[in-house]
Amino acid sequence: MIIIHAVNAKPLPRYLQGALVERLRVMPAVVVIGARQTGKSTLVQHLTPGERRFLSLDDLDVADLARRDPEALVGGSTPVILDEIQRKPELLSAVKRAIDRHRRPGQFLLTGSANLLLMQRVSESLAGRASYLTLWPMARREQLGMGRCGLWEKLLSTEDRDWLDVLRSEQSHPEDWRALARGGGFPVPAVHMKTHAERAVWFEGYVRTYLERDLQTLSAISALPDFRRLMRAASLRLGQLVNQTELSRDVALPQPTVHRYLNLLETSFVLVRVAAYSLNRTKRLIKTPKLYWGDIGLGLHLAGLPELAGAHLENIVLQDLLCWRDGRTKQTEILYWRTATGEEVDFVIEGGGQLLPIEIKATSRPRLSDAATLRSFRVEYGKASRAGLLLHTGETFQWLAPDVLAAPWWSVC
């Protein structure tokens, strides 16, 4: 049974759409991955309405046909959308054979709610045949219907001395970052729900579905209460260095189990680990990463905190950075910087031979002392570093120092 979904109301545009169209012109297959409910199915269906067969592996008839006769499912001259491919990863071998028989651009458009490249069950990566894109929860400007994320591209392509003019020319309006964090970036709670109570019901349903259904696709988890306890413990360590020994002790689980559970959270895009910046790229893999959530609203729901902290504002900025990074064709990394003496810069953009250090402060009145670590970073890396960017919760634009610009977070994100 082939399901062809009808296209109804036009959804809000997504920043990733441009990169998706561009890659479909070049590659036989494009795989859009990301957490459940980020809008992957909606994005691919509205991209070329009526031009592709839509096959969802969530549909039992389609899943059964994928098991019995995968060649029939993916064959034919009509381009195909295979939704939730992680449910039948063995189907990727049939996709590979179909591409090798009749290689043409845009032949397959796949979606998956897990990082197929990290899944142990996936033996076929479609190397040389597929391009991978990640759809993150909606950035603030996507939620506003602008179809884009923050101004990172403009800042990187503009001289430091002109940043102030670039940001002021956008005419952005102040926004309550706490309300944005509570709503998160999943389209349903972020855009279509207006009250905290409604969102709490949605997030609880999301967690239940993830634990009881989606997680089992990735790995057999017999003790779901233990897994949920780890999720909550991780949500309470937002923005902190990942200490698996400490986590193991706090949730009373063996360290190898904690390690496996964190990997599962990352594979399904629920958790994000930000690596440390170092000139030596090998050391980046060794140094302790920082922990954030793919969606800050989900992280807050799990934590159950009555008050928000600066780390939650950091997570908002990180979501915007990830949205921008994964829509670029140029290789870009989002990292953090920390010295042996404890100096730290929240995020560092590395791309195109440039370094852009970013510090986030949950204060409406930034001071020169808030720029200290940004200036230390610039001293350390000299001409390789752009001016520092200090994002705050107020409304003022100000050069705190000749090499550090303070700007409201909403003027950039």
Image: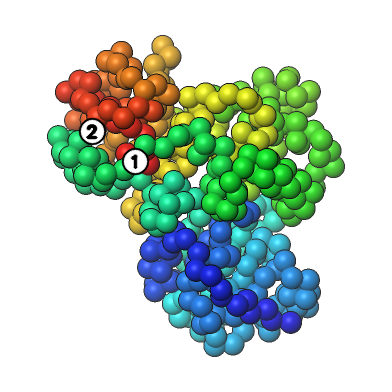
Q: Secondary structure at mark 1?
A: loop
Q: Is residue 202 rendered to the left or right of residue 43? A: right
Q: Given the image, on which type of amino acid does mark 2 rest?
A: Arg
Up-down relation of residue 84 to residue 288 (above or below)? below
> Looking at the image, can residue 284 be seen?
no
Distance (Cα) linking label 2 and label 1: 26 Å
Q: Is residue 366 rendered to the left or right of residue 130? A: left
- Residues 190 and 185: in front is 190
| Quadrant containing the C terminus in the rendered view | top left
- Residues 310 and 237: in front is 310
Residue at the image position 20 percent from the left and 25 percent from the top: 399
Question: Residue 3, image x and y in percent?
Answer: 68, 78
Where is mark 2, residue-wise? 386
Q: Find the residue positioned furthest to the front.
A: 195
Q: Is residue 59 rendered to the left or right of residue 346? A: right
Question: Residue 21, image x and y in percent?
Answer: 41, 69
Q: Residues within 10 Å of mark 2 (few under 14, many from 20)?
A: many
Q: Quadrant of residue 36?
A: bottom right
Mark closer to the observer (2, 1):
1
Question: Residue 305, image x and y in percent?
Answer: 64, 26
Q: Find the residue positioned furthest to the bottom.
A: 77
Residue at the image position 39 percent from the left and 72 percent from the top: 26
Q: Is residue 286 rendered to the left or right of residue 234? A: left
State the mark number for residue 173.
1
Q: Given the image, on which type of amino acid does mark 1 rest?
A: His
Question: Residue 158, image x and y in percent?
Answer: 19, 43
Residue at the image position 73 percent from the left and 75 percent from the top: 62
State the mark number for residue 291.
none
- The way the protein has been coloured in the rendering is rainbow
